[in-house]
Amino acid sequence: MTDLTPISFAATDIDKIADHTGRVAVFIGADGKLSPGARRVNKLTKGALARLVESDRWGKLKEGDKVSLSFPAGMAAEAVDVIRLERGAKASDARKAGAALAKARGGKGDLLILAGQLRRAQEVLYGFAMRDYAFEPHKTAESTRGGAVTVMHGDPDALEAQAAPLLAVAEGAHLTRDLTNEPANVLTTTAYAERIQQMESLGLKVDVLNEEELAKLGMRTLLSVGQGSDSPSYVVVMRWDGGAKDDAPLALVGKGVVFDTGGISLKPGAGMEDMTMDMGGSAVVVGTMHALARRKAKANVVGLVGLVENMPSGNATRPGDVIRSMKGDTVEVINTDAEGRLVLCDVMWYAQEQFKPKAMIDLATLTGAIIIGLGHENAGVFSNDDAFCNAFLKAAETEGEGAWRMPLGDGYDKLLKSRIADMKNIGGRPAGSITAAQFLQRFVKEDCPWIHLDIAGVASVKSETALAPVGATGWGVAALNRLVANSYETE
């Protein structure tokens, strides 16, 4: 996993500022008042900070924006990064400031953050940790990430304690990004299952169900997706039992198609290389479980991921085949490229049968239609329970992760009617993301609150976001962690 940059915490010592090499970061509010650390930097640079805050440029900066003073006279540092941030800034602005620092530093130099008495310094560190990411395991050049980070603060022990759970979430997001960015020849289904098993060291209970076990359980729709590949299919179950012993868990279910050619319904060649990210839903589940275990969440959560590869071969499922699901319903496969729902429906049914969860969320890079509808700003949210859905939307909004509720309804459900089976696996081009959700809803028991998250537009992007560089974003780890913290943790 891409490790977080080491962060150490120390009491403010202004005598050490002059000799620090690398970069030094200071925070100044709109009123231009300088903290003790900033005053020392101002003195060393013969009034450079005072001149900056009196300039027109300073007045045009927004909260969280940065100005860099390169190679300041009187200091060993290569730059001083001056962030406009109020002492009591909002969490979102503090995270923006941290991301700006991560983006600016580059190279190998260490970073000294003079946090003073910032009330949300932990949010600055979270923003820094989230943006301080690069996927580099397959590059032979030296790393582009910087060196260590030291934070000087009025109460370093308290800040370290406040930052710890946030940095655990950043770790989970990094893991999600690593898995989503990884090429399919490296992250095979078997290698993926092995990586998840390594998380037992965090206190998770991990079980890997192989094809023979899945066949005995009747997971025929899941197995039908992977039967054209030489890579075996698996379901991996991760349990975090941090809550009351008899408390039913929250279930998280993820689509883990490590590569999607479309099967016999072959995708166009252009852009197919991006289908290494078609396991993005499972990666969010894995990253969330990692975060919950790292911060010792006081909740019971079970994560289940279906790991398959969708390939064309003489053994592959054909359009027109009829498959019986674990639930017992039959599915006419119209398009083998609508495979994610075939994976999810069996795992969702198993999750309900085995764990009887108090609620269930599935995540998948499921449809291109959701990108047409919502672009890359929001995931599509579908639910059978208003209160549950609203709790998730609130959590996503708090964490700045875009999510938008989409409709469900009988009219859409009718589009799945099959002449020869209980249902088709697609409903045609109109409302493609909605009919996909309607398909999944058929595998949700009436008493189970359920959310389906279509993350096709947000799992991996071609331009950087507020807290992530180009590529896999880790979207969803923070929102799901927040939902657990808000609604499922016990005292």
Image (cartoon, rainbow, N blue to C red):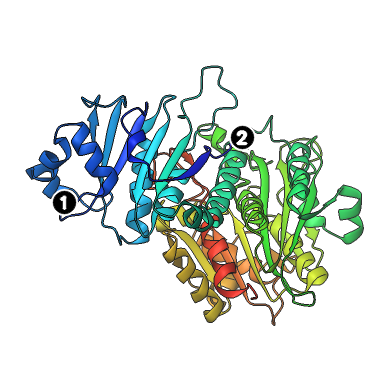
- Quadrant assignment, res 414: bottom right
In the visual, does 320 lie left or right of 473? right
Write down the residue under mark 2.
Answer: 182
Q: Residue at x 55, y 21 (%)?
A: 139
Closer to the chain start, of discs 2 and 1, is: 1
Residue 32: which numbered mark, if any? 1
Residue at the image point whose x is 86% and y is 54% from the top: 214
**Tag 2: amino acid:** Glu
The type of residue carrying mark 1 is Gly
Q: Residue furthest top?
A: 140
**Residue 369 marker:** none
Label 2: how many Cα within 10 Å (few below 14, some 14–19, many 20+) = some
Indicate the secondary structure of the residue bearing disc 2: loop
Asked if 403 appears above or below 82 in the picture, the reply is below
Query: Relative to 221, is 382 on the left or the right?
Result: left
Q: Secondary structure at mark 1?
A: loop
User: How far across and down, in percent of the image, does residue 364 sit?
Assistant: 60, 55
Rendered location of residue 202, percent (x, y): 73, 50
Q: CA distance from mark 2 to mark 1?
A: 45 Å
